[in-house]
Amino acid sequence: MEPNIRVKGFDGDWEERSLGEIYTERNERGNDSLQILSVSIHDGVSDGELDEEGLGKVVRRSEDKSTYKHVYEGDLVFNMMRAWQGAIGVVKTEGMISPAYISAIPNASVYPPFMDYVLRRKEAIDQINNLSYGVTDFRKRLYWDSFVKVKCCLPSVEEQKRITDTLESLDRYILLNQRQCDDLRELKKYMLQKMFPKDGEKVPEIRFAGFEGEWEQRKLGDMGTTFTGLSGKTKEDFGHGDAKFVTYMNVFSNPVADLLKTESVEIDRSQNAVQYGDVFFTTSSETPEEVGMSSVWLESVENTYLNSFCFGYRPSVEIDPNYIAYMLRSDIVRKRIIYLAQGISRYNISKNKVMEIEVPIPQLSEQKRIGEYFATLDSLITHHQRRHDTLLEFKAYLLQNMFPKEG
C-alpha cells in the first residue's frame, strides 16, 4: 500500500501492522516530583490535569498521586473512556498520568511523534470506536486487549521522520497564525473598552492624535427613527424569491452585516426595505448579555429586508456608519443596553427604551478615524481567520493523502 502523496526520495509499499506489534504496556509508578500530564480529545497529550472524561476542563489536582503512572517522552497515552473520540496522543516530555489512562512503550519500528498523526486520523479513531465497548457510548472503554488490535500502515522510520517534520512545520505555522488572530481579537476587545468614554467621562482614555475637546452624549432617539422587520410572513415565504433579508444571526454575529449571509425571500413592496447606513438590533435572546446586539448595513442593494426578530434604526443626522457599528458594541454602550433586558427564561428589549439610551458622539472627523480603525482591525482578523481555516483544510488534505488507505 502506498499513499497518494509521497515524500520525495521514498518508494515501495507501507507495511500494515497491529499496535500490539508496536507497543508494550507500561505500568510504572510516578512520583510527586513529576509534572502531571493529560490527554484530551482536541489537543492530545498536554500539561495539566483534566477531568476524567478528557474534555479539556481543568480540575483541582487530587492530593493522592500514589496510583499515578510514570511516562516518558515517546510513550503513547490514551484515555480509556474517550479514546473513541480521539483522546490519544504521544508524550513530549517526561511526567505522570492519571490511572484512568493507559500508557504504552513504542519499539524501534516507529518514530514516536509520527504515531501522534497516525492514531489521531479519522481512520484510526473509527477503528478505536469499533473496538471500544460499553452499555452506551458514554460508557464505552478501550481496553488494552482491544487497543492492540488496531491496525495501521507504516513506512520506514526515515520516511516517518520526514512526514512528521512536514506536518509539525505546518502545525507550528497554524499555531502562529492562530495566535496572531487571537492577539488581534484581544486588541479589538481592549480598544472597545478604551476608545470610548466611560460613564461620567467626556473623553476616552485612548484617542488619536490631533483630536481634542469633549464628546457629546446624545440619545439614539434624537438622532434617528426606528422601523420594523418583516411582518405577516410564514415559513413557506422564505428560501425563494428575488429579494433578500438580513437574518437574526447575521445581525447578532457581525458589527457590519454581511451581504453574503443574507437569505432569499419574495419581493414585498409593503415591507420596510433597508438602506445604506441603517442599524439593526436584535430584540430577544436567552441571556441578558446577548440582548440588543447591533449591526450596521453598508450595502446599497434593492429589495433587501430585515428579519422579524430585529428592529431597524435609521439615523437622521450625519454619523459615520463604521463608527456607530463599533460604538454600539463598545463596553460602555453594551452595558447600557443589557441593563434594559427584561425576562426570566428568555430576555427581551424594548425599542423605545433603546432609543432612550445615550451614546458618545465626537466630531465627524474623529468618528471616521475611529470607524476606519476598527474596520481595518476586523478586516485583519477576518484575513487571519480565513487563512487559519485554509491551513486546517490543507492539513486535513495531507492527513488523508500522505497515508495509505487501510484495509
Image (cartoon, rainbow, N blue to C red):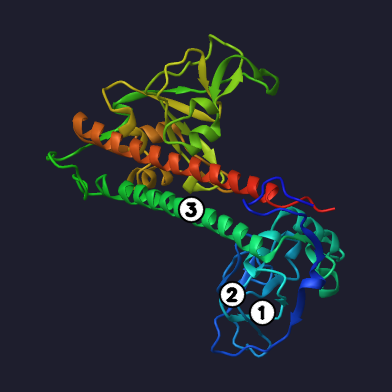
On screen, residue 296 above or below 128: above
Q: Earlier in the sequence, mark 1 or mark 2?
A: 2
Within 10 Å of disc 3 (Cα), the crowding (few <14, some 14-19, many 20+) is some
Residue wearing tag 1: 98
Q: CA distance from mark 2 to mark 3?
A: 27 Å
Q: Are marks 1 and 2 in contact (CB under 8 Å)?
A: yes
Within 10 Å of disc 2 (Cα), the crowding (few <14, some 14-19, many 20+) is many
Q: Position of residue 76 (x, y in %)?
A: 68, 72
On screen, residue 8 above or below 75: above
Q: CA distance from mark 1 to mark 3?
A: 31 Å
Residue wearing tag 3: 173
Q: Are marks 2 and 3 in contact (CB under 8 Å)?
A: no
Within 10 Å of disc 1 (Cα), the crowding (few <14, some 14-19, many 20+) is many
Horizontally, residue 166 falls left or right of residue 210, namely right
Instruction: Give amino acid for label 1.
Output: Ser
Q: Earlier in the sequence, mark 1 or mark 3?
A: 1
Task: Identify which residue, 13 or 242, lies in the foreground.
Answer: 13
Which label sits in the foreground, 1 or 3? 3
Q: CA distance from mark 1 to mark 2?
A: 8 Å
Q: State which quadrant residue 221 falls in.
A: top left
Task: Identify which residue, 162 or 185, lies in the foreground.
Answer: 162
Badge 1 marks a residue whose secondary structure is loop
Q: Position of residue 15 (x, y in %)?
A: 79, 60
On screen, residue 129 above or below 49: above
In the rendered image, is residue 122 in sight?
Answer: yes
Q: Position of residue 154 (x, y in %)?
A: 74, 61
Q: Which mark is on residue 343?
A: none
On screen, residue 225 above or below 142: above
Instruction: Give amino acid for label 3.
Output: Tyr
Q: Position of residue 176 (x, y in %)?
A: 45, 54
Q: Which mark is on residue 49?
A: 2
